[in-house]
Amino acid sequence: MSLDIDPSELSSRPRWRHLLLLALMLALLLFPLQRLAEQYYRGELAQQNSQTLDLYVANLLGILKRYEVLPQTLGDLPALRHVLEDKRNPNHVDEANRLLSRMRELTGADAIYLMAPDGETLAASNWASADSFVGRNFSFRPYFQDAVAGRLGRFFGLGTTSSKRGYYFAAPVREGASVIGELVVKVDLDHTETLWGNTPEQLVVTDSYGVVILTSRPEWRFRATRPLSEQERREIQSIQPYPTLDPQPIDLIERAWLTQERHLDEMGWTVSIKAPITLIERPVNTVLLVGTAVLLVLILLIGLTMLRRRHYLERIAHDAQARRELEHRVAERTRDLERLNARLKDEVLEREHAQQELFRAQDELVQAGKLSALGTMSASISHELNQPLAAIRSYADNAVVLLDHKRADDARGNLQQISEITGRMASIIAHLRAFARRDRHAPESVALQPALEDALALLAKRRRGLDVELIRDLPDAPLWVQAGETRLRQVLGNLLANALDALTEKAVPRKLWLSTEEAADSVTLLIRDNGPGFTEDALARAIEPFFTTKTSAQGLGLGLAICDTLTRALGGELHFANHEQGGALIRLRLCRSAPGVVPHAPEDPSN
Ligand code: ADP
């Protein structure tokens, strides 16, 4: 499948808007994440504070419970009863003071004191100190009133002399059914506050008026956590539990704190732990930060993926573009090649045409060369024909005379001679015809020896005239070569005529050697003469048309040029050299061919 994308489409895509939209959608996820984290950390903190609160409450209750039974038990001690029975006796008072002082040391209470039914303190553990309770009247305190009424009195308040916070337990001392005095144990609660330590969570203990009595935050101490009613204000003013008679409201932003509470019903107190909400905000913010970071990474990854996808699409688009360009170039190139091809075809046609013209021209040249050779040979040919013609005439004339003399037999002899001579003449003419004929161009199988004989026959007269010795070293069996009958005769005729031309320049003995060399696919004819040999110039330029060292009457300089052209056309080769013992040595190499039919050899006029 091909994915063709126009690059301009890519750039117009609103991909960054998509990414922004996605980022916004993902950012919305941060809200539920915040809620979840808040819930989780709130739960964690609540659970942790709840445990701390339980521990604190148990500790507080433990302290108070320890002292709760003390006033009831101590009230039965005889030393104290003695004082109640006779409060003017200083010995009894002294004994009671010492006993209470010892009891205080033993129990760890803040103060223990004995009061008369009218509220006057008769004996106290702090009798020896400057702020001794002895002689002081605490009948305004609610614990006194409870104890006088025969109940266990409980009260939180600030010591009027010590200004120290304490919890008071008061129990009636009975004699039969009547109350004869009250024993009070004051417990110090300051240390329960200092126990808390310096933590972000704050301890707040409020009494039944909602006023803070114990807290880890000093500025909250004795402040009202709720509005006080008029009745409550009056009560506070009468029992004076705090250093102030009018507790001011606390400025507490409730939602800034996570509060856990326990109610202590016996005392009417509420113990609470207030944890600043910032304790939750910090981890929640961390979660949000991590969430945001994850989100950013996610968006970054999506952005990167989009970028990579875009690059991928761009690359595909680019590839497609390159492919289109390549296809276009290939198409152009193909068109060019087709044009070139057409031109080549035209050129080939032109060349073929030119070659045909050349062949025709060569043909004409060969023919011209042949005719020129015939021209030069015409003298000897006419001599060749004139001689038998003269012989015929004289035989015929003689025959007429012989017939006149009735010598019929002799006349028959003459006629026989005439017949033989005409046969010889026919043979000469046949050789001439074979030479002058235009050849077929297709190569054929030609026997070398008969063609050589033909050429020799045409030159036989000249050879004999020059007294040239012919030395043949040729096999008897015909050597079949690839050639044309006439063309081969023409080549051989030219080469032999040249040899005879050369030998005319030399004195006897004149010799002409003819031999062959055979190879698997070729036959080479060697023509050697003992003439002067090729001049250096002739060796270099022998096959040039119109090169000759002879007079214009002797030669045109076309012979070897034609021989070379014809030999090449037959697939053979013509090689000119000088023999080391002098004279020219010409090698005509021709391709071997399949045996054909030996043509009827015309009679050799030399025979
Ligand atoms: P032409 O015979 O008309 O001069 P050719 O082309 O046949 O033209 O020969 C060219 C030349 O080659 C001759 O003029 C001659 O100088 C030299 N030549 C050819 N054959 C021989 C030979 N057998 N011996 C010495 N020279 C030769």
Image: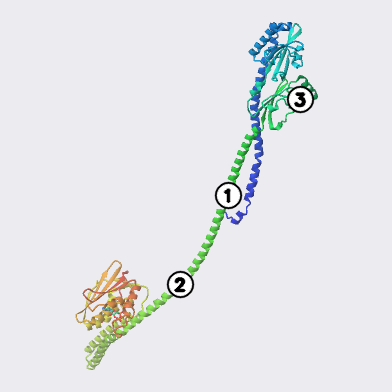
Q: Which residue is mark 1?
A: 307
**Residue 266 visible at all:** no
Badge 3 amino acid? Asp
Q: Return the disc, 3 or 1, that comes first in the chain's sequence.
A: 3
Q: Residue at x 27, y 83 (%)?
A: 424
Task: Give ligand 1's quarter of the image.
Answer: bottom left
Front in this rendered view, residue 151 or 119:
119
Element on which disc 1 rests: helix
Q: Residue at x 27, y 69 (%)?
A: 518
Answer left or right for 162 relative to 414.
right
Rendered image quadrant of residue 507: bottom left
- The Cα atoms of the two marked residues, 1 and 2, are separated by 58 Å
* Coordinates of residue 492 in the picture (x, y in percent): 29, 77
Residue 347 — which label? 2
Element on which disc 2 rests: helix
Q: Return the disc, 2 or 3, that comes first in the chain's sequence.
A: 3
Badge 1 amino acid? Leu
- The Cα atoms of the two marked residues, 2 and 3, are separated by 130 Å
> Disc 1 vs disc 2: which is toward the camera?
1
Rendered image quadrant of residue 442: bottom left
- In the rendered structure, are the residues bearing label 2 and label 3 in contact, judged by CB atoms less than 8 Å apart? no
Badge 2 amino acid? Glu
Residue 176 — which label? none
